[in-house]
Amino acid sequence: MAAVKSNEDNKSNFRNKTLPTVLFKIARFNPVTDLRMKFIDYKVEYENWSTVLDALLMIKHKIDPSLALRYSCRQASCGSCGMMINGKPRLACFTKINEVKSDVIRIEPMNNFPIIRDLAVDLTKMFRNHKKLKPYIIRSDSEIPDFSTSKEFLQDPDSIEQYIQFANCIKCGLCNSVCPTMATDSSFIGPQALTQAYRYVSDNRDKGKKTRLKIIDDKHGIWRCHFAGSCSKVCPKGVDPAMAIQFLRGYLLGFR
Amino acid sequence: MNKFQKNRSGIKSWLNPWGYGIERIAYWLMRITGIGLLIYFIIHIYETSSILDGKAAWNKMLELTQTTEGHIILMIVIGMSTFHAINGIRIMLGHGGIGVGKPGRPDYPYLPKSQNMKNKLCIYAAIGLAALAMLYGAEIMFSE
């Protein structure tokens, strides 16, 4: 009985607890009806464990259902909720409100991607560039016509280490958003696609190196990267696109 | 599609180096010094071409560089060329995949290996040596 009472006391204390608040300034823009972007303020309470995505969903569910944003897994696996949080591209689900260390959080759509509405951006071009660089194993015997003669493409652990880091890419687009070249050259392939090109070039089962190097050896290709390194700084999965791009360029320059 | 819908950060993305570490500052300095050296190069060609108008014209042009303003401009040129040369070597090596680390499974908090201490030290060295070269140049020019 005492235990039950204590539990109820805890519940009561929990309900009466005063939670800290944070002011969200959220960019709102509907290309169909609006001529320019505007910011709307929302004050929300948050817990120690609350993420920016938690707060945005709370705003959407309880304050303003018209807020448009994209999200899915809530655990930094799907790469859907990339947005500018206080000026830096980050995943909303992977950013705790506490770690932003500010009473005001400014939320904008990711830079360098066309806006669909509010915080939802169009990733079509990034996926098109990704596809252009053939993100799959290329080899003449990759199709298995007869199971009796087929064999597994064996790979030792050291060979996996050469590309596994780059295979962690979740295609969130944060690297493209922060890239200074992407900011001014709309035809640039972008760090995301270039990194994926290296992921397959460095895979010893793949035979498509020449094909991919030919695609990236273009005036809007790999030569436009100036090694600012910000792509690696913002990557939420530790992919390090700057490293992959320099290795890839090393092949074209004859260093590798 | 209007500029708000296109949502490109544009040239202001080049002009703001803050928030992404010393590598982004080095990128910004490399651009600024590159443009500065190009402007200097054009002025330098104009300056040296004055010799075609005879000795008097050449001496008159040289007098311009012997003023306080001329010395300050030359000091800035010395700093720009030193930084651009040293950071340029770092970038050229990096572009070949040299000194950018080795691939491997990343661990949280995912510090990028391409932005390792070797690279950072090269950038600090480029900035430091540019400052030293400027001071040395100033010492020679202003002590004349």
Image (cartoon, rainbow, N blue to C red):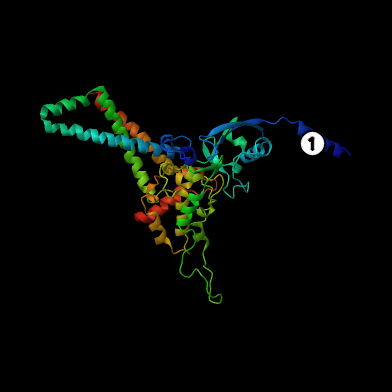
Q: Which residue sits at x=28%, y=28%?
A: B73
**Residue ranking furthest to the bottom:** A148
Whole-percent x and y of residue B97? 40, 51
Query: Tag 1, which secondary structure?
Result: helix
Check the image and report above or below for A45 versus A134. above
**Quadrant location of the C terminus of chain A in the rendered image:** bottom left
Q: Which residue sits at x=18%, y=27%?
A: B62
Q: How many marks?
A: 1
Q: Residues within 10 Å of mark 1 (few under 14, many from 20)?
A: few
Whole-percent x and y of residue A29? 55, 37
Q: Nearer the viewer, residue A127 or A114?
A: A114
Whole-percent x and y of residue A207? 44, 64
Q: Nearer the viewer, residue B100 or A253?
A: A253
**Quadrant location of the N terminus of chain A in the rendered image:** top right
Q: Quadrant of residue B12?
A: top left
* Residue corresponding to mark 1: A11
**Residue ranking furthest to the front:** A33
Check the image and report above or below for A154 versus A175. below
Evaluate whether residue B32 shows in this view: yes
| Subunit bearing disc 1 | A
Q: Which residue sits at x=67%, y=30%?
A: A20
Q: Nearer the viewer, residue A194 or B65?
A: A194
Whole-percent x and y of residue A159? 49, 60
What amino acid is labelled 1 in the image?
Answer: Lys
**Residue ranking furthest to the left:** B54
Q: Quadrant of residue B87?
A: top left
Evaluate whether residue A49 shows in this view: no
